[in-house]
Image (spheres, helix red, strand yellow):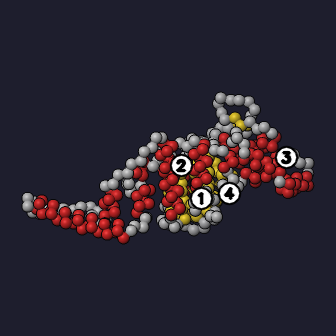
């Protein structure tokens, strides 16, 4: 099990805690991309305003994969310097035969270069030829290599890229952090479920943003849940703690003693856990609809102007009110 990562802001003194799988939900243009870009700077050591687990990060402390929302596998088939496939090849261990072949390529290029230079000098005696990367045969091969992959849709592009990142995350030695913007933008529900199941088997931290809700049963007690609104990030407690808090806070008590007795009952009876499971399996995904809506509203009346959250019980209503309060959304 991976230890949590704490990110401390030196200026605001605020701390964000990340676990293995972290989901950052927000509406369009809420600040998700900027937040992920800032985290990329923090984990790659480019930022000097934050500490990770109490220390200033430098380049190489974390193995970071940062995938923008519009990026697919085709961006990496070109084998440019930013290509993850090229990165995978460069970090691979090659056989003795490969190294021997590279030496032969280098020697052959050197002989060919000398002959070409001799031909040119018969006309222009002062010239000198140069072949870039001839002393780095692997780079020479990759610069002139093309890779193709048959894909029928943008969702396949995204899924193939995720498969590549998963494979890389399993082989790296340093702590790996994978940052993916709008991770489920082109994925259907089944593909989203499969992806989240796959990443749970790696030893990497995943920080994923999304403007689309997902099945709430995928958010277990180990998953960290965040909301982004107006470029501000809010950390939410686990669902069970959130439920317990809403039950204790919104019940009406005559005395402090009644409050303490009720709180103790809620903790020992397991009622909060039962209600949390009910919410987790809510097919309406009302919690995530709140997190991904710009102007949500708690109501039983339909509206064409905003996202309406319709609670079915008083307990549900109290829970949603608690989330509105935490996210600074007016009721």
Mark in the foreground, 1 or 3: 1
Q: Which residue is depicted at the point 57% across and 60% down?
A: 202
Q: Secondary structure at mark 1?
A: loop
The label shown at residue 305 is: none
Q: How far across and down, in percent of the image, does residue 330 sit?
A: 70, 40
Q: Residues within 10 Å of mark 1 (few under 14, many from 20)?
A: few
Q: Secondary structure at mark 2?
A: loop
The mark nearer the N terminus, 1 or 4, is: 1
The mark nearer the N terminus, 2 or 4, is: 2
Q: Is residue 124 above or below residue 161?
A: below
Disc 3 to disc 2, C-alpha distance: 39 Å
The label shown at residue 222 is: 4
**Which of these two is toward me, 49 or 147?**
147
Disc 4 to disc 3, C-alpha distance: 28 Å
Q: Secondary structure at mark 3?
A: loop
Pointer 2: what residue?
A: 181
Pointer 1: what residue?
A: 201
Q: Residue furthest left?
A: 123
Mark in the foreground, 2 or 4: 4
**Which of these two is toward me, 96 or 279?**
96
The label shown at residue 251 is: 3
Q: Residues within 10 Å of mark 3 (few under 14, many from 20)?
A: few
């Amino acid at each position: 099990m991976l230890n949590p990562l704490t990110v401390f802001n030196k200026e605001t003194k605020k701390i964000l805690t990340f676990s293995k799988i972290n989901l950052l939900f927000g509406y369009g243009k809420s600040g998700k991309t900027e937040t992920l870009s800032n985290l990329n700077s923090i984990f790659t050591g480019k930022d000097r305003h934050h500490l990770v687990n109490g220390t200033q990060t430098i380049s190489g402390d974390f193995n970071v994969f940062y995938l923008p929302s519009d990026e697919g596998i085709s961006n990496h088939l070109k084998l440019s310097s930013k290509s993850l496939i090229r990165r995978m090849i460069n970090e691979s261990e090659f056989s003795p035969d490969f190294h021997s072949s590279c030496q032969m390529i280098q020697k052959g290029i050197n002989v060919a270069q000398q002959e070409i230079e001799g031909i040119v000098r018969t006309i222009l005696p002062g010239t000198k030829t140069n072949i870039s990367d001839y002393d780095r045969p692997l780079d020479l091969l990759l610069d002139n290599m093309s890779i193709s992959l048959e894909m029928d849709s943008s969702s396949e592009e995204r899924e193939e890229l995720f498969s590549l990142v998963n494979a890389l995350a399993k082989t790296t030695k340093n702590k790996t952090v994978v940052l993916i913007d709008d991770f489920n933008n082109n994925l259907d529900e089944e593909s989203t479920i499969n992806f989240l199941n796959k990443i749970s088997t790696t030893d990497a931290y995943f920080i994923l943003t999304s403007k689309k809700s997902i099945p709430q049963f995928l958010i277990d007690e180990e998953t960290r849940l965040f909301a982004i609104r107006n470029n501000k990030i809010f950390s939410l407690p686990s669902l069970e703690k959130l439920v317990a808090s809403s039950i204790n806070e919104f019940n009406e008590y005559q005395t402090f003693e009644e409050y303490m007795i009720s709180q103790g009952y809620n903790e020992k009876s397991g009622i909060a856990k039962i209600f949390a499971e009910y919410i987790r399996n809510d097919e309406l995904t009302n919690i995530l609809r709140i997190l991904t809506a710009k102007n949500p509203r708690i109501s039983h009346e339909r509206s064409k102007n905003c996202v309406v959250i319709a609670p079915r019980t008083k307990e549900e209503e109290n829970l949603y009110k608690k989330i509105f309060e935490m996210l600074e959304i007016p009721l």
